[in-house]
Amino acid sequence: MDSPYSHELQVAIHAVQAAAKISQLVLHSDDKGTVDKEDLSPVTIADFAIQALLTATIHGIFPDDSFVGEESATDLRNNPALLNRVWELLLRLQDDEAKALCKLPRSPDDMCEMIDRCGFGEPGGPESGRVWVFDPIDGTKTFVRREAYAINVALLEGGKQVLSVVGCPTLPADTNGPIDNSTVDCTGLGSIVFAVKRYGTYIRQLVETSGEPVPRKIEPHAASASVADLRAVSCYNMLDSGVDDAHEAIMARLGITTKGCDFLAWVLRWVALGLGLANVTVWVYKKRERTGKIWDHAGAMLLFEELGGKITDIDGKEIDFTAGRLLRKNHGFVAAPACIHDIVLKAVHDVLHEQGKAHLLA
């Protein structure tokens, strides 16, 4: 892809390829060094190592850019044994050809500093300049089960998405869907899905076999869709944060009778939309104060938007990536082809009013 972000794109792709190798070193291990964070979500040694690798690599090439990532190094600083495991995992890349394209932290202390550069980073407002956003492993719960997960790398400029690179080690590059958490790429090659603002969405093999894989451009399937064409992606029976009965009623109102794609990881839901395996998703949180996290959505949303998709919250407001690490100015998500987004949004409002849940709307 020839774009103003060609250099950034190549750096991010190489970093994601190396990050995927780290993840796969851990994926089939029974002991992933898993600890629970304050919000009770799990984090593994792969999460820490990947965030350190991504930050060290991109900071080394773009030293003036800022960073936001899911993890901080607090648990590592408080647990020397865990810190050593993460450091030893990174060192396993030293003799790998992927290391030549990336930069490793210089020491365990430098590793912690790289992690914290993201873990305490804020996206900032419209004047914030260039900010990279990382989710080292989105879908850690399914990763621990050796199922689907994604590595998310996004670049924001002034709070707007300009670049998305998502590594999908379990997702075949030639999949036709529907797909779910248990989908496995039997070839072991995986895929990378990427997009640049105004230049489209593409997919290619994650693992290079003979020469550089040729990316395939995804056709803008959402540009002229009708309600009859809607196919859903959601998360079924794995999260207690959403209003499941409302989601089911909304899909029924829209005439969607099949479950479609099913992913715990939000990034993979955006990937499914970007690949045309689905073209609608709705998420209503049970409580108004619940919010999304920037690393679960930034960049990955661009994959769908580049194909004619429109994404708002359930109030119809644009997603605001300048609000902070949490998307505090938005509640829930409604994604659909732009030409019929208003119809989907109306179905959301009608169902919530009918179910006595209008208090979840602004």
Image (cartoon, helix red, strand yellow):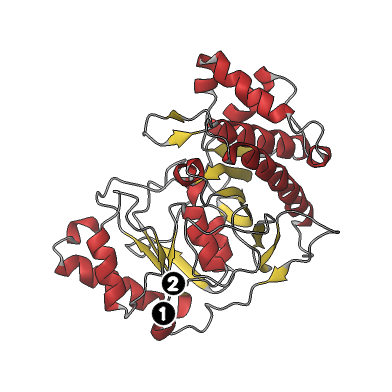
**Left or right of 215, for residue 345:** left
| Nearest the eye: 135 or 196 | 135
Instruction: Tell me the number on the disc at residue 81.
Output: none
Which quarter of the image is occupied by the N terminus?
Answer: bottom right
Mark 1 crowdedness (10 Å alpha carbons): few <14, some 14-19, many ≥20: some
| Nearest the eye: 167 or 127 | 167
Which amino acid type is marked by label 2? Answer: Ala
* Inter-mark Cα distance, 1 to 2: 7 Å
Which amino acid type is marked by label 1? Answer: Ile
Element under disc 2 = strand
Q: Residue at x 43, y 52 (%)?
A: 264
Element under disc 1 = helix
Q: Percent from the top left, x then y, of residue 84?
A: 62, 19
Quadrant of residue 136 within the rendered picture: top right
Q: Residue at x 70, y 56 (%)?
A: 189
Instruction: Tell me the number on the disc at residue 340.
Output: 1
Do the CB atoms of the residues marked 1 and 2 lie less than 8 Å apart?
A: yes
Which quarter of the image is occupied by the C terminus?
Answer: bottom left
Q: Percent from the top left, x then y, of residue 177?
A: 53, 70
Relative to 259, say whether 359 is above or below.
Answer: above
**Left or right of 105, for residue 160:** left
| Nearest the eye: 96 or 133 | 96
- Does the image show residue 322? no
Q: Percent from the top left, x then y, of residue 36?
A: 41, 30
The furthest residue to the right? 211
| Nearest the eye: 340 or 286 | 286
Instruction: Tell me the number on the disc at residue 336.
Output: 2
Q: Percent from the top left, x then y, of residue 109?
A: 66, 18
